[in-house]
Image: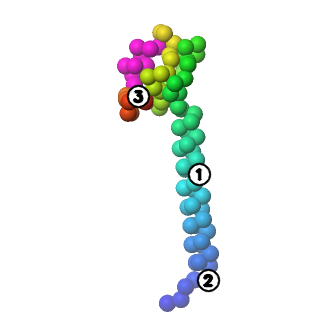
Amino acid sequence: MRTQPGLPILVGALNHARDHAFALALAFDELYGALNDFTGADLRNADLTGVSLEGLRWSATTQWPSDWVEQIEHGSAWIHRPVCD
């Protein structure tokens, strides 16, 4: 059985693309985490009107506007103490 002449080049290109896609996915996960990590943040003066807090990560040290505290605490799930999502 004879190998197609372009097959090794194609396999190499696919492997290269896969490696770059994997690296890009890891970078995206890190960026997403950084953009949504509000653990320890002082948000007391933030206007959260219309802001989606879904996926936002916070902790017991995150400070919320006083009129949002109850809503935040009831609408969150502990990932591992002291971090919520």
Alpha-carbon span between mark 2 and mark 3: 58 Å
Q: Residue at x 53, y 44 (%)?
A: 29
Neighbourhood count class around disc 1 (C-alpha, 10 Å): few under 14, some 14–19, many 20 upward: few
In the structure shown, which secondary structural element does the residue marked by tag 3 occupy? loop
Tell me which label, 2 or 3, sits earlier in the chain. 2
Above or below: residue 71 compared with residue 27:
above
Looking at the rendering, the stretch of residues picked out in magenta corresponds to 68-76
Which residue occupies the extreme top position in the image?
A: 67
Residue holding disc 3:
82
Q: What mark, if any, has residue 24 been given in the picture?
A: 1
Rendered image quadrant of residue 30: top right
Question: Is residue 24 shown to the viewer in this render?
Answer: yes
Q: Nearer the viewer, residue 53 or 65?
A: 65
Image vertical order of residue 68 relative to residue 58, above or below: above
| Kind of residue at badge 3 | Pro
- Look at mark 2 in the image and give the residue it sits on: 5
